[in-house]
Amino acid sequence: MNLDNTKKIKTVLQAISIFVSVTMLWFVGSTWAEEARSHPEHGNTKAVERLQEPAPVIVWGRTIAVLRAENIDGVKPAERAHRIAALIEKLSARADWQISTLQVEAHGQKTILIKTKTDILFAVFPGDVDPDSGETIEQAAQSAAAMLKKVLDDRAAQLRWSYILKGIGLCAAATLIYLLIVWGVLRVKNLAIAKLDRMIAESRRSLSVAGINMVPILLVIERFVTKLSFLVMIFMVTYIWLAFCFAQFFYTQPWATDLGEYLMGLLQHFALGIIGAVPGLFAVVVIFWLTRIVAVAVSRFFSGVEKGAISVEWLHPHSARASRRIVLVVIWIFTLTVAYPYIPGSGSDAFKGISVFAGLMISLGSTGFISHLMSGLVLAYSGAMSEGDYVVFGDIEGTVRELGPMTTKIMTPAKQFVTIPNGVVTGSSVTNYTRLAEKDGAIMNTTVTIGYDTPWRQVHALLMSAADHIKGIRKFPAPLVRQKALCDFYVEYLLAFHIDRPAERIPIMSELHAAIQDAFNEAGVQIMSPNFVSQPENAILVPKSQWYAPPASPPENQHT
């Protein structure tokens, strides 16, 4: 049999198959019409054009068509879509499929068949056309046929090694570029954080709001915002890389399309949100700018009062700093109240929820905060201490380095930086030696116990002599000695004196105690501390010859 005869037979067989299919379709339609005429009460339930819930025919992630009507057998659109998709999936993966349409009439209804050369795949009924789209049944059928043809061609191309290797190669190249970009972004992030940290640290003096050092807060915010920004950049690069890799293979191309559409929709949403927030942001910027001008003016006024450049009767220089903090806090709280309605998203339920949660947390945890804050105000307005004062309270003494709204920071003579809550400070007595030293010097005292067998006049003279040898003790007002108590075994003497530098109290006291020991030892007077229950046989003295017993050395050897 030659080739021409084969083609003729093939053509005849195709014509016969089409004729049989159309005849069967007509026969089924006639039977349905006869059934409808004999049972008119069921006519509406079998109408082809009855609209149902739309059901898409999805093959390889692509929508071939959307079905909205029952077929002539009363099959629902969802079941029709499932059967059609399963039938298309069974077609062999080859690239020579010829998809065409054939228009027929069934019960006076125009119906278009989507078919291959030999098989009818599915039918498009008038009820399948979206009535709101303005599309005709012919256009809907042509669109479905074109999409089906593209899906079958793409599926066949997916199995070719050349196409697979090309997709793998492009994905590998994209992955390499992606990794380089991520590495570069991480490197730039570290450099940016280090640079911003240095900038904030260099601006330490000017970064203060209401007397509160904003450097630690700004460092946390800066690092969080920077890391979040670069994380968003990495996410965007990852998103684009993933969409590109999906686009290289026909099966995953719908995923790439969905990713792209979602990203564009998200960007459009953000863009519209930013545009809509511009007026409010502008109002917030103006409000904060004006508040900043007022805050600077207020800060300069109170700073002038604190330094003595400005004098007002109703404000003491010692309380000027605390007053400045209070006024600035009130100003900024008022500013936030005014600017709140203009903040983008302030009216949303999420923003309100966060506000309620923050208020609840502040209410639950503000007891200690308010207590220390009020104690800080008491310290500031009472004038009990200020920065630079040498104070003693409890077992802590040292120079006040910072008198903050919540805590007081003290540098001890041992170079220890102690932070004490203001509530603790106000709960104990405070001795301020600096305030005592403003006129005649700070008054210090020490005690010594001497037996009754020693003339009190001799003890007075020895104590005055020891005080005269100490450089840090003022000559005027002169030191004085008082007999503080007459105890069972000894007399307690008190030596009071004045010093100009309270911060040197401990070394001056140490030097004075050494001088008292030397003076009493040299005079042969026994110091009765610790207490003696009974008098020893020999006086408890250190002869002058033993003052520099090893490993001590005389003064002339100490400087060699």
Image (cartoon, rainbow, N blue to C red):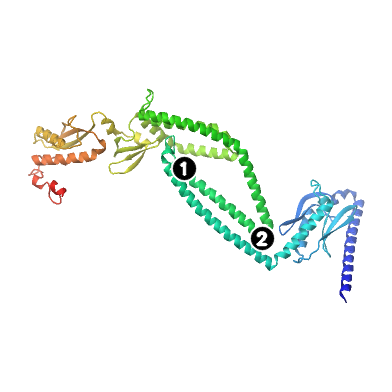
Disc number for residue 248: 2
| Crowd class of label 1 (few under 14; some 14 to 19; many from 20; radius 10 Å) | some
Disc number for residue 278: none
Q: Locate residue 239 relative to residue 514 in the image: left or right.
A: right
Q: The residue under label 2 is which amino acid type?
A: Gln
Q: Residue furthest left?
A: 537
Secondary element under disc 1, as helix, strand or loop, is: helix
Q: Residue at x 87, y 73 (%)?
A: 6
Q: Residue at x 12, y 39 (%)?
A: 519
| Crowd class of label 2 (few under 14; some 14 to 19; many from 20; radius 10 Å) | some
Q: The residue under label 1 is which amino acid type?
A: Leu
Q: Residue at x 57, y 61 (%)?
A: 176
Disc number for residue 218: 1
Secondary element under disc 2, as helix, strand or loop, is: loop
Q: Residue furthest bottom?
A: 1
Instruction: Establish if 443 lies above or below 201.
Output: above
Q: Locate residue 148 relative to residue 545 in the image: left or right.
A: right
Q: Locate residue 483 relative to residue 305 in the image: left or right.
A: left
Which mark is first along the chain, 2 or 1? 1
